[in-house]
Image (cartoon, grey):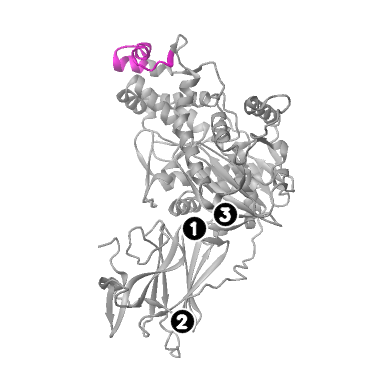
């Protein structure tokens, strides 16, 4: 038996059967909803390791303002974003977010801190949880569990309040939530439930509501990056493939130096948080012609996403050519390798205990590692020193009865030494080895994408996201793919997605064609055909032989869908006298689905059309039109009884079935 018993048999409802021929109708006036006028667009880049927001007033869309500098900040890590960390009080109430949360947690006495709930890097849970629901839990540093939805809602509410406060301060009068259009970015490779989860968390945080869903746009990270990259001028990026010496440097120096210059340039301009997006198509774009293809590789803390886009002139609309792919190959992989290295030197049992008993010191150690991680470069020759927190040294001695120094001498890890100043001294090779598994996975995945037939003749590869700042990743991508396309890095690479998301919020129509990530259809009854249909699907009702559980397809996985496109099918009740019509909507990752009972088919919506009380003068074959409209990251379904114009609507729901 499958996950679903036959709905037709179990519910006793005769179900619906297709009115032949089933056809697709393109709706020209797909959706003439009056565009609500928002005063400002605020985009939130909710990242695995760091988060931030940016905004633009709809009256002056060429100015993008990046949020105020945050208090706190780490040595060796300069940026406009704040760590994605959140702290709840022992009573589970929101306390603080970002640097403030981290520093407060750090300053707590260990006897106290074990009662506080501290969360970091929790966004990955949405990617890794197979059966995500509104009830999914997250685990705090002290091992206690809290509902993920609450944590995400607290984080979004924090950003909402910060942004509204900044807008109010700037405008001198209170800014209301209803004047803001919100954009939240999510990885393109997230499954539908995770995207819907973000929307639910935003509703809980009060950014928008189910009654007013268009106030919130869920944008896909690589798409946002792509929109921003189109606006780039040549001085705003680093072209890794320019073979000629730049400013008298030969290419081998340029990766490092180009970046140093860029950083200098950014540092000088740090005071100004406003970026002018020239309302032109950037120079790089002017080299692209109709039909040209480019790939955006968004490498962040948790995931790496890749999307292949094609240009459609004259407006330069984007068309997605190959569905987003990627995986958990973000820079967290490097942290994980560092942790494995520590386990190898000091013992897994000790590291596990240390994380539980001294969670704040563990966080400190990872912060120290983070700043050294950013100093890693292909041509580095001098060692990298990582400060070990005092409590690490102290606790190790208590735990093992000998010193950290002794452990390092005894371990056979020869490229990590102990320096007299209480630091771990790593050779550049040792550091590069920590990056290797993650970078290899990214390069491998990119190679697979490049081998797909849809991905021939790619002109540019835009490397964006926080991890794209790593010279090691830049060099690996350049040496693997530099011969096939030009590898380009926007200068403020960590803010690319944020700015693109603002541009997307100002003009959501810029992305015209997407690839459907799933196959969608409804469960129907067909006339039973001997030899074609399996015997166990036979259902005899009132002398008619039906085949149950048939999956009637609306759209296949990876099919192109224009934004706002509506697919229509017509059905008729299998039993003419039926007055309540129930249509179940199903999805699957497979292209070819024949029956809703096949493995991997999930129910994701129900349309319930009640026709009681309608006029008796109904044709004997009642036509029920079913429409599915494929929107931004939302999908809406609707059923209409043609004779009476009675209709019912539903949003596709992946979390509650």
Q: Which callout, 3 or 1, points at the residue further toward the start of the chain?
A: 3
Residue underneath mark 2: 623
Q: Residues within 10 Å of mark 2 (few under 14, many from 20)?
A: many
Q: Position of residue 654 (x, y in %)?
A: 42, 57
Between discs 3 and 2, the one toward the N terminus: 3
Q: Check contact, mark 1 vs mark 2: CB within 8 A.
A: no
Residue 42 visible to the viewer: no
Picture disc at residue 320: 3
Q: Position of residue 360 (x, y in %)?
A: 42, 26
Q: Name the one closer to the observer, 104 or 358.
A: 358
590 left or right of 36?
A: left
Vertical order, 92 against 77 (above or below) = below
Disc nearer the start of the sequence (1/2): 1
How far apart, in angstroms, are the residues tagged by discs 1 and 2? 30 Å
Residue 121 in the image: x percent, y percent?
45, 37
Mark 3 or 2: the one toward you? 3
Q: Per the image, is 406 magenta?
A: yes
Question: Which mark is drawn over residue 558?
Answer: 1
The span shown in magenta is 394-417
* Crowd rating for badge 3 (residues with CA inside 10 Å; few <14, some 14–19, many 20+): many
Quarter of the rendering containing residue 511: bottom right
In the displayed structure, 547 sits above or below 217; it is below
Q: Is residue 161 visible?
A: yes
Q: CA distance from mark 3 to mark 2?
A: 35 Å
Secondary structure of the residue carrying numbered label 2: loop
């Amino acid at each position: 038996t499958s996950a679903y018993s036959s709905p037709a048999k179990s519910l006793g409802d005769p179900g619906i059967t297709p009115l032949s021929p089933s056809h697709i109708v393109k709706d020209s006036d797909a959706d003439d909803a009056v565009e609500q006028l928002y005063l400002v667009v605020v985009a939130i880049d909710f990242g695995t390791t760091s988060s931030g927001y940016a905004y633009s007033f709809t009256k002056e869309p060429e100015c993008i303002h990046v949020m105020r500098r945050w208090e706190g900040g780490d040595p060796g890590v300069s940026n406009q974003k704040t760590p994605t960390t959140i702290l709840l009080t022992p009573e589970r109430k929101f306390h603080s977010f970002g640097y403030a949360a981290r520093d407060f947690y750090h300053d707590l006495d260990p006897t106290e801190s074990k009662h506080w709930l501290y969360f970091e890097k929790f966004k990955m849970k949405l990617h890794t949880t197979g059966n995500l629901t509104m009830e999914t839990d997250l685990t705090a540093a002290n091992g206690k569990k809290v509902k993920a939805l609450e944590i995400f809602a607290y984080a979004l509410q924090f950003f909402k309040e910060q942004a509204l406060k900044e807008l109010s301060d700037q405008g001198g009068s209170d800014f209301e939530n209803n004047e803001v259009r919100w954009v939240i970015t999510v990885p393109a490779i997230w499954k539908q439930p995770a995207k819907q989860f973000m929307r639910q968390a935003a509703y809980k945080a009060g950014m928008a509501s189910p009654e007013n869903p268009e106030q919130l746009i869920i944008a896909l990270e690589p798409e946002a990056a792509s929109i921003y990259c189109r606006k780039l001028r040549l001085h705003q990026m680093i072209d890794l493939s320019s073979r000629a010496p730049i400013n008298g440097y030969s290419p081998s120096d340029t990766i490092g130096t180009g970046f140093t210059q860029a950083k200098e340039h950014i540092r000088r301009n740090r005071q100004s948080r406003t970026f002018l997006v020239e309302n032109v198509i950037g120079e790089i774009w002017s080299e692209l012609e109709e039909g040209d293809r480019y790939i955006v590789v968004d490498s962040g803390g948790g995931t790496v996403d890749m999307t292949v886009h094609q240009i459609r002139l004259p407006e330069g609309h984007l068309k997605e050519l190959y569905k987003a792919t990627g995986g958990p190959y973000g820079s967290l992989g490097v942290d994980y390798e560092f942790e494995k290295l520590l386990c190898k030197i000091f013992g897994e049992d000790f590291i596990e205990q240390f994380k539980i008993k001294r969670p704040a010191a563990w966080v400190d150690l990872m912060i120290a590692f983070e700043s050294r991680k950013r100093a890693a470069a292909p041509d580095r020759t001098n060692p990298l020193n990582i400060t070990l927190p005092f409590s690490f040294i102290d606790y190790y001695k208590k735990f093992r009865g000998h010193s950290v120094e002794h452990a390092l001498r005894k371990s056979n890890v020869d490229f990590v030494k102990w320096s007299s100043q209480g630091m771990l001294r790593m050779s550049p090779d040792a550091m590069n080895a920590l990056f290797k598994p993650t970078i290899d996975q990214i390069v491998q995945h990119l190679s697979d994408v490049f081998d797909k037939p849809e991905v021939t003749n790619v002109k540019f590869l835009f490397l964006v996201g926080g991890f794209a700042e790593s010279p090691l990743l830049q060099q690996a991508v350049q040496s693997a793919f530099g011969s096939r396309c030009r590898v380009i890095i926007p200068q403020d690479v960590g803010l690319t997605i944020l700015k693109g998301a603002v541009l997307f919020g100002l003009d959501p129509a810029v992305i015209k064609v997407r690839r459907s990530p799933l196959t969608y259809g409804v469960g129907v009854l067909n006339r039973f055909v001997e030899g074609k249909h399996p015997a166990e699907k036979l259902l005899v009702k009132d002398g008619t032989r039906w085949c149950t559980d048939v999956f009637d397809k609306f759209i296949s996985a990876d099919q192109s869908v224009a934004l706002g496109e509506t697919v229509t099918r017509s059905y008729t009740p299998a039993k003419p006298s039926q007055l309540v019509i129930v249509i179940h909507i199903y999805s699957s990752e497979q292209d070819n689905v024949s029956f809703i009972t096949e493995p991997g088919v999930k129910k994701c919506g129900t349309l319930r059309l009640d026709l009681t009380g309608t006029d008796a003068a109904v044709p004997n074959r009642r036509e029920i039109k079913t429409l599915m409209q494929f929107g931004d990251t939302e999908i809406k379904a609707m059923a209409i009884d043609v004779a009476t114009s009675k209709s019912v609507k539903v949003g596709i729901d992946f979390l509650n079935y």
